[in-house]
Amino acid sequence: MSEYLQFFNLSMGDLRDRSVLDVAVGPSSFTAEACRAGIDVVAVDPLYGKSAEALAAHVKLDYGHMFDRMRATENSGRFRFKSIDEAERNRRAAARRFVTDYESHYAQGRYFGAGLPQLPFLDRNFDVVLCAHLLYLYPANHDYSFHFEACRKLICGWRGKKYGFTPCVVLMGDRSRN
């Protein structure tokens, strides 16, 4: 969770007593860890709705490809980690925490299967809206219109306390065109 807080320049005080929407989350453990700390978080990702086993298998394959690409290009997008190996260990441990929490809390509505720009929530429903990677990391997958509508939907879901969109780099560390 500390990496996520740093990533969005947030403190625990920014999140306490607020409703948080985390969009395009994937296998992040932020929701699990934040809820354990008493923060009201709902996570949304198109992959949600599958079984925990299917998600774990997806993460294993996806992370295998991602870390192979990072090693092949000596990608420096490992944020606060000293090495790609350390980043991989951290991400895989976070994914295990996510899968465990997902398995226990999907049915209670902590995790929703949906993707931008369509979200299953009323407008102005959340105090804090976060979207970490989707908007900038994969520019070849989404055009300007998608980005515009996705940002519009994220802002519409926000009640006016705090939001965060980051980073502005694509998968291999280059600046985003969008």
Image (cartoon, helix red, strand yellow):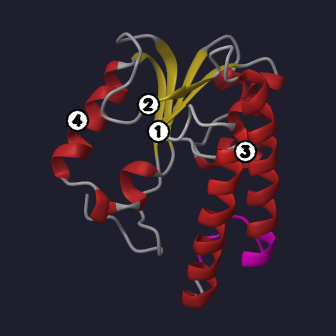
Which residue is tagged 2? 114
Give the mark, 1 or 2, whose residue is nearer the N terminus.
1
Q: Nearer the viewer, mark 2 or mark 4?
A: 2
The answer, for residue 79, to whether it is visible in the render is: no
Q: Is mark 4 on a helix, strand or loop?
A: helix
Residue 168 vs 115, above or below: the answer is: below
Q: Residue at x 62, y 13 (%)?
A: 18
Q: Identify residue type, mark 4.
A: Glu
Q: Which of 17 and 112 is in front in this view?
A: 112
Q: Nearer the viewer, mark 3 or mark 1?
A: 3
- Residue 34, how many percent across, how many down? 75, 28
Q: Which of marks 3 and 4 is in front?
A: 3
- Residue 166, how many percent across, how many down? 47, 49
The answer, for residue 141, to whether it is visible in the render is: yes
Residue 104 vs 58, above or below: the answer is: above
Q: Identify residue type, mark 2.
A: Ala
Q: Is residue 95 left or right of residue 42?
A: right
Q: Is mark 2 on a helix, strand or loop?
A: loop
Judged by its main secondary structure, the magenta piece is loop
Q: Which residue is drawn at 77% across and 59% down?
A: 92
Which residue is tagged 3? 53
Q: Do the residues labelled 1 and 2 touch (CB within 8 Å)?
A: yes
Q: The magenta stretch spans which residues? A: 76-86
Q: Identify residue type, mark 1.
A: Pro
Q: Is mark 3 on a helix, strand or loop?
A: helix
Q: Are marks 4 and 1 in contact (CB under 8 Å)?
A: no
Q: In which quarter of the image is the N terminus?
A: top right
Which numbered circle lies on residue 149? 4
Classed neighbour count for the residue bearing mark 3: other residues with Cα under 10 Å, few (<14), some (14–19), many (≥20): few
Circle count: 4
Q: Is residue 19 left or right of residue 134?
A: right
- Residue 86, how many percent across, how many down? 81, 71
